[in-house]
C-alpha cells in the first residue's frame, strides 16, 4: 500500500516541495534515456542512493526494491543482450534501477496528500472542460485507503466460503464481496457528506487555489 | 463549545415508501448527555441522521440552534458532528493526519488553525506522534479514537454517535467512556450498551419509530426491558 511506503520526516528531502521532487523525477527519467553511457547513469544511481540516508529512508529499501525487480531485470537484460548487445542490456538495467530508486525515494519522503495536491495543479487546466481535479485526487486517495480493506474483505469471504466447503467458487466469492463493498461505499459516502466535504459548490471542501498554496503542508 | 444549542423536532415523520420509520410529535433536547435505546429498526439511527441533515424528514421540522436541518445544511453540519457505527466506513483517508484534515479542510480553516486543532485532538485521544501512521493498520480501538478525534477537531457543538461501542471489547468500551466523559459538547448516543448510559441525564426509548419512554437512564432502561418482555410474551 502506498500509504505504508511513506517514511515520516522531517529531513532535508522531506522539506523539498512535492512538485519539485516530481519535476526532478521527470527530468531524471528524460536524462536517463538521453544519456547512453551506463557509467554516467550508474553515477546518477549512486547519487540517488546517497539521498536515502539524507531522507531518513532505510538503506535496505534500495536492496528490497532491486530484489523485487530482479526477475524482470534479468529477463530484460537477457533479451537486450541477445537481440542487441551487452552494453544495451547494462544501459536498460541501470536506467530502470535508477528510476525505481528515485521514485521510491520520492514516495517515501512525500505525503500522499501533497502528491495529490500536485496532481490537482497538473489537472487544473482541465477544469474548463468540466473535469474536477480535486475529485479525481480525492478518488485516488480513497483508493489507496480502501484497497487493503477490500483485500481483507475478499480474504474473509474466501475463508467463510471455504469453511462451508465452497472451495474457490468465483461466484460465491464475487456476490458477497460486491454486496459488502456496496454497503461500505454507502457508509463512506454518508461519512464524507456528514463532514461537509465534497459539496456541490466546491471541491473536496477546499478551493483549488488553497491546495496550490498548501501543497507541501503535510509533506514534512 | 460551552452552551450547546437546543435540538428541536416538531411533528417529524420519516417514511421509506409506505413504511413510517420515525414519527415524533414534539421533542426538545437540551441535556448534556442523552442516550437513545431501542431494538434494531426502532428508528434510533434515523433520528440521529435527521440531526445532521443526512436524512430529511418526510414532514415536520428538525432544528438545531434554531436552524432548520433541511434548509441550512452546511451550518447545521458545523454544529453537529457525527460519529458512525463502523469506523472502517468513516475513516476515508490513508493516514491519521489526512483523515483529521479532511473535515478541517471542509471548514476552510487556515493551515495554522488546522495544525493546532489536529494536535489538540490527537493529544486528547491518545494518538499524538502517530500522524503519519496508516489508518488501515490501526487496531479497532484506535480506529474508534481516530473517528472521535477527527470529528472533535472540527469543534462541533453537538456530538452524535451511532452505536459507537458496538465493535469494542470491554477495555475498549471503558476507554471510550473515559474519553467522552470530559468532552465539553452535548453528546447524543444511540446504543445497545446499556452500561454506557450510566450518569446520562436523559434516555429516550424508541419503539417502531416512536418515543416509547423518556426519562432518567434507570427509568428508561426499565421501560425498555418491560417492552422487550412484553414483546417476547406476545410472540
Image (spheres, coloured by chain):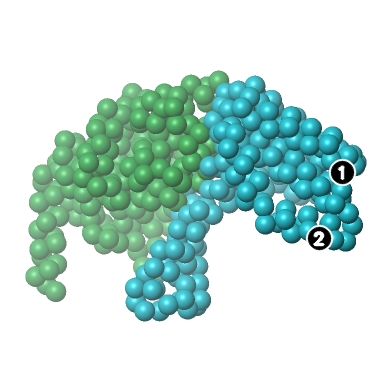
Chain colours: A cyan, B green
**Residue A180 placement: quadrant:** bottom left
Residue that badge 2 annotates: A79
Residues B214 and B154: in front is: B154
Residues B98 and B64: in front is: B98
* Mark whose residue sits in front, 2 or 1: 2
| C-alpha separation, residue under disc 2 versus residue under disc 1 | 18 Å
Q: Are marks 2 and 1 in contact (CB under 8 Å)?
A: no
Residue found 67% across the figure and 51% down from its top: A69
Q: Which chain hosts label 2?
A: A
Quadrant in the picture for the C terminus of chain A? top right
Left or right of B59: which side holds A147?
A: right
Nearest to N terminus: mark 2 or mark 1: 1
**Residue B19 placement: quadrant:** bottom left
Left or right of B128: which side holds A189?
A: right
Q: Which chain hosts label 1?
A: A
Image spot of residue B229 (x, y percent): 10, 63
Image spot of residue B222 (x, y percent): 10, 51
Image spot of residue A197 (x, y percent): 55, 41
Left or right of B126: which side holds B109?
A: right
Looking at the rendered structure, the secondary structure element under dot 2 is helix
* Number of marks in picture: 2
Residue found 51% across the figure and 39% down from its top: B95
Residue found 88% across the figure and 54% down from its top: A85
Q: Which mark is residue A33?
A: 1
Looking at the rendered structure, the secondary structure element under dot 1 is helix
Could one spot residue A105 in this view of the protein? yes
Left or right of A17: which side holds A86?
A: right
On the same chain, marks 2 and 1? The answer is yes
Q: Is residue B114 above or below residue B75?
A: above
**Residue A75 placement: quadrant:** bottom right
**Structural crowding at the residue carrying mark 2, measured as other residues with C-alpha within 10 Å and reported as few (<14), some (14–19) or many (≥20):** some
Residue found 82% across the figure and 51% down from its top: A89
Amino acid at each position: 500500500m502506498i500509504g505504508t511506503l511513506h517514511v515520516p520526516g522531517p529531513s532535508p528531502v522531506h522539506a523539498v516541495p512535492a512538485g519539485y521532487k516530481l519535476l526532478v523525477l521527470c527530468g531524471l527519467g528524460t536524462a536517463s534515456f538521453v544519456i547512453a553511457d551506463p557509467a554516467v547513469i550508474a553515477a546518477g544511481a549512486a547519487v540517488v542512493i546517497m539521498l536515502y540516508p539524507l531522507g531518513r529512508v532505510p538503506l535496505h529499501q534500495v536492496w528490497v526494491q532491486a530484489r523485487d525487480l530482479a526477475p524482470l531485470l534479468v529477463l530484460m537484460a537477457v533479451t537486450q543482450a541477445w537481440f542487441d548487445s551487452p552494453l544495451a542490456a547494462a544501459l536498460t538495467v541501470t536506467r530502470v534501477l535508477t528510476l525505481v530508486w528515485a521514485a521510491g525515494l520520492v514516495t517515501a519522503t512525500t505525503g500522499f496528500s501533497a502528491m495529490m495536491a500536485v496532481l490537482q495543479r497538473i489537472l487544473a487546466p482541465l477544469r474548463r472542460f468540466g473535469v474536477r481535479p480535486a475529485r479525481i485526487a480525492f478518488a485516488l486517495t480513497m483508493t489507496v485507503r480502501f484497497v487493503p480493506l477490500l483485500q481483507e474483505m475478499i480474504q474473509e469471504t474466501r475463508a467463510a466460503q471455504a469453511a462451508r466447503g465452497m472451495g474457490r467458487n468465483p461466484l460465491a466469492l464475487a456476490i458477497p464481496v460486491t454486496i459488502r463493498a456496496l454497503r461500505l461505499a454507502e457508509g463512506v459516502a454518508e461519512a464524507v457528506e456528514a463532514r461537509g466535504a465534497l459539496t456541490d459548490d466546491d471541491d473536496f471542501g477546499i478551493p483549488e487555489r488553497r491546495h496550490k498554496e498548501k501543497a507541501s503542508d503535510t509533506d514534512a | 463549545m460551552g452552551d450547546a444549542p437546543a435540538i428541536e423536532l416538531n411533528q417529524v415523520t420519516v417514511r421509506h415508501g409506505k413504511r413510517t420509520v420515525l414519527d415524533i410529535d414534539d421533542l426538545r433536547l437540551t441535556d448534556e448527555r442523552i442516550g437513545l435505546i431501542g431494538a434494531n429498526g426502532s428508528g434510533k439511527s434515523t433520528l440521529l441522521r435527521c440531526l445532521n441533515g443526512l436524512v430529511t424528514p418526510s414532514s415536520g421540522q428538525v432544528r438545531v440552534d434554531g436552524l432548520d436541518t433541511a434548509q441550512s445544511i452546511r451550518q447545521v453540519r458545523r454544529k453537529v458532528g457525527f460519529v458512525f457505527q463502523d469506523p472502517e466506513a468513516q475513516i476515508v483517508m490513508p493516514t491519521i493526519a489526512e483523515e483529521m484534515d479532511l473535515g478541517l479542510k471542509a471548514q476552510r480553516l487556515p493551515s495554522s488553525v488546522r495544525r493546532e486543532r489536529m494536535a489538540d485532538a490527537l493529544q486528547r485521544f491518545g494518538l499524538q506522534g502517530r500522524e503519519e501512521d496508516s489508518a488501515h493498520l490501526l487496531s479497532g480501538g484506535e480506529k474508534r479514537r481516530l473517528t472521535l478525534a477527527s470529528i472533535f477537531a472540527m469543534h462541533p457543538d453537538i456530538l452524535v454517535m451511532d452505536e459507537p461501542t458496538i465493535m469494542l471489547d470491554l477495555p475498549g468500551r471503558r476507554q471510550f467512556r473515559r474519553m467522552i466523559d470530559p468532552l465539553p459538547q452535548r453528546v447524543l448516543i444511540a446504543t445497545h450498551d446499556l452500561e454506557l448510559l450510566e450518569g446520562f441525564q436523559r434516555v429516550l426509548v424508541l419503539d417502531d419509530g416512536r418515543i416509547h419512554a423518556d426519562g432518567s437512564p434507570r427509568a428508561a432502561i426499565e421501560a425498555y426491558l418491560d417492552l422487550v418482555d412484553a414483546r417476547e410474551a406476545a410472540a
